[in-house]
Structure formats: C-alpha cells, structure tokens
C-alpha cells in the first residue's frame, strides 16, 4: 500500500511539473497602441521636442544606452551622451520641435519581452532660419518602468549639425 501511495505521489509530481513546463512555454506575443509603455515613450518624445532634457533623461534607466544610424547595438553609448547632443541642437534651435506625424506601438515577443517602436516626422528651425523636416524610426527597450535603450534611424542630411557627429 505504501508503495502505491509513493508511486502515486511521484506520478502526480511528474504530471504537475510537466504541466508547469507547458505554461512556461506559453506564447506571450502581441502588440498594442496603448498602455504604460506607450505612455512612457510618448512622455520621452514630448520632453525631447520641448527641449525639457532633464525630464527626457528621467524617462531612461541609469544604465540606458543609445545607438543612432548604426545597425543593432553596434557602438552603443550612454544615454547621457545623447542628452548632450540634444542640448547642443536645442542651443541652435529656434523654438520647439514640431511633431508632424507620429505612430507608436509596443510589441511583445513570445517570451514576454517588450519593444517599443515609433515612426515620427519632426519639423524644426535653427536660429539661422535653416529648416529641417525628417522622418525618424525609433525603437526602445524597457527596464521595468524606464526606457533601457534607444535605437534610431534617420536621414543625416536633414538634421542639425550636432546629430551629424
């Protein structure tokens, strides 16, 4: 009798573990156009366009990085370096950056990791009167309730000089 009980317990444990493995493999993929990650992305973009760079920086984790106009994570730099570039461009800019068009999404891949994407069309004018209109694709990674990295691609011929370095 004891032997049957022990075998039954082992079988139940095995089935229980097998069921947990099935749940661990659940596909969590999806996408959305709203939610806390979208709100965070929009907040960062709004602070950037208004030149509120301390508030922009606060949207990122302490160890956040960025890559612009390079493939993947090639030569990533601390986000603080990007804030300096934004500041140099702001110093040359007349007024705020205008958002002409914007689309945001957050994609969740099967393991549950989330990536934000933005397609933006910006317009700005330098103090010299030079005007810039540029379409930008941006991808972001998340670290809890902060942005962990930014990866952007845009036409370098249509941006202020600080972004060309």
Image (cartoon, rainbow, N blue to C red):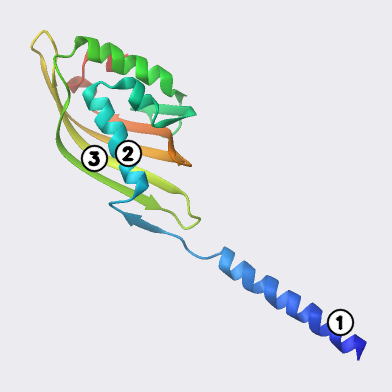
Q: Quadrant of residue 103?
A: top left
Q: Quadrant of residue 93?
A: top left
Q: In what element is the residue under mark 2?
A: helix
Q: Residue furthest bottom?
A: 1
Q: Is residue 56 left or right of residue 109?
A: left
Residue 9 spot, x, y in % from top left: 80, 80
Q: Nearer the viewer, residue 71 or 123?
A: 123
Res 129 → quadrant: top left
Dividing the image into 4 quarters, which one contains the C terminus? top left
Q: Quadrant of the N terminus?
A: bottom right
The mark that comes first in sequence, 3 or 2, is 2
- The location of residue 74, given as percent across then percent down, is 45, 28
* 42 up-or-down from 15: above or below: above
**Disc 1 marks which residue?**
6
Residue at image mark 2 = 41
The residue located at (22%, 26%) in the rendering is 49
Give the left or right position of residue 88, taking residue 113 as reference.
left
Residue 134 in the image: above or below residue 35: above
Above or below, 112 against 128 in this view is below
Q: How far from the left and from the top, in percent, is residue 56?
A: 34, 26
How far apart, in angstroms, are the residues tagged by discs 3 and 2? 12 Å
Numbered disc in front, either 3 or 2? 2
Q: Is residue 22 visible?
A: yes
Residue identifier under label 3: 119
């Amino acid at each position: 009798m004891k032997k049957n009980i022990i075998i039954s317990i082992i079988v139940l444990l095995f089935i229980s573990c097998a069921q947990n493995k099935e749940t661990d493999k659940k596909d969590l993929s999806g996408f959305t156009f709203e939610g806390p990650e979208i709100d965070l992305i929009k907040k960062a973009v709004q602070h950037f366009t208004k030149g509120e760079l301390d508030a922009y920086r606060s949207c990122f984790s302490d160890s956040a990085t960025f890559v612009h106009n390079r493939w993947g994570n090639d030569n990533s730099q601390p986000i603080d370096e990007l804030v300096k570039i934004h500041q140099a461009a702001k110093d040359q800019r007349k007024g705020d950056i205008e958002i002409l068009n914007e689309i945001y999404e957050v994609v969740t891949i099967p393991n549950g990791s989330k990536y934000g994407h933005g397609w933006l069309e910006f317009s700005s004018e330098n103090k010299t009167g030079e005007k810039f209109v540029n379409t930008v694709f941006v991808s972001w990674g998340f670290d809890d309730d902060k942005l962990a990295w930014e990866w952007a691609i845009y036409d370098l011929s249509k941006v202020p000089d600080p972004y060309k370095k």
